[in-house]
Amino acid sequence: MDGVKKLLEWWKNSRLGRAMARYGKANGALLSGGITYSALFSIFAALTISFTVFMAIVGNNTALRDAVLESLDTALPGIVDTGDGGMLAPEDLELSTAGGVVGIIAVLVLINTATTVMAALRTGIRAMFGILAPKESPVMGKLRDLLGFVGLALAVVLTSALGLAAGALGTALLEVIGLQDAPFAGALLRGLGFVVALAMDTLVFILIYRLLAGARPPRRDLVLGSVVAAIGAGVLRVGGTTLVSSVSDNPLLASFAAIITLLLWVNLAVRITLMVGAFTANPPRVPDRKMEMITHFHECPNYVTITAPETLEWDHDPITGQIRPHQAEPDEYWGGLVGWGKRAFQRQPQPDTRPVEPAQPIKRPQQDSESRS
């Protein structure tokens, strides 16, 4: 049992253990579900806006178009039809060029729907960092969400473009040195593509944590957390194909495979983002909840309410209304040699200084004295 306790204590003090404790205390699982629900409506609007703009600018580049569609199919398996089946054909993602007021309203509604998930993601990440952000105007908040959405859309295009460029450059270098037919050539090119995707994913998570959420972690923590999140996203991207096949093989879920896959994939991606956000924050250890920390739980009401004005005097968070745990007053700290001597003296067993009560005379019963006489 002592070994288990030491292992549990080590886990609670480790960075990963403290991050998971922050994720749990900040309701990370509940936030992930809410963000996933928002993303279900935002993704299709985001795909429509992004693909329409992309086709209007570089739609004539067939190679880049196919690479972007493959990236979308890898990121969102089963949604876009790239030749092996999917929920939507590429032509369905293009917005009709209806002009006038109706077209403008349609575009504005799609942009507002596409950026909704960015606001939810920002709230969740700030909860992982424990950030209390100042009040922001709705216009600035929507502008921040729009910039985050544009950054993610550009990241998808850049990842595809850089992947094509890296593949072409790697093939050319292998031909120059005469190793194009080597057995490891294919693996080397795939590895180069993974490195490019990892670098772009790292930049995306830096954008999410630093610009979208407004967190300001130290540079080392920001880079470390973004790399960890990028690795997690890469593993999830590679496992997306396995996820689609496992859902499609189930006859009960086959007809809903694309939607179920989308929900599972987005939920896992959001959980990775929030967990790594808590890891990047490197929070202190969450104290163990003890009974002496719980206050007012057995009272009626046991929460802060205007209905009972006396509860307003309780120690609580004025923003959330949550009652704060009772904390014992810390002992006065002395540093230096004086503090060392004081702490050493406190560790020694102290003598019992309570006054000793005088012994009371023993009174014998009167029968014993009469019997002796």
Image (spheres, rainbow, N blue to C red):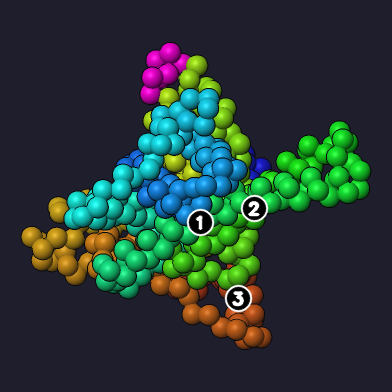
Residue segment shown in magenta? 250-256
Is tag 2's residue or tag 3's residue first in the polypeptide sequence? 2
Measured in 3D between alpha carbons, the distance from the residue under mark 3 to the one under mark 1, in whole angstroms, is: 59 Å
Q: Where the N terminus falls, by quadrant?
A: top right
Residue drawn where x is 48% and y is 38% of the image: 76
Residue drawn where x is 52% and y is 47% of the image: 60
Q: Mark 2: which amino acid?
A: Leu
Which quadrant of the view contains residue 241? top right
Q: Mark 1: which amino acid?
A: Leu
Measured in 3D between alpha carbons, the distance from the residue under mark 2 to the one under mark 3, in whole angstroms, is: 62 Å
Circle 1 SS class: helix
Q: Mark 3 = which residue?
A: 343
Label at residue 154? 1
Is tag 1's residue or tag 2's residue first in the polypeptide sequence? 1
Q: Is any atom of residue 321 visible in this view?
A: yes
Along the line of sight, the residue nearer the viewer: 331 or 128: 128
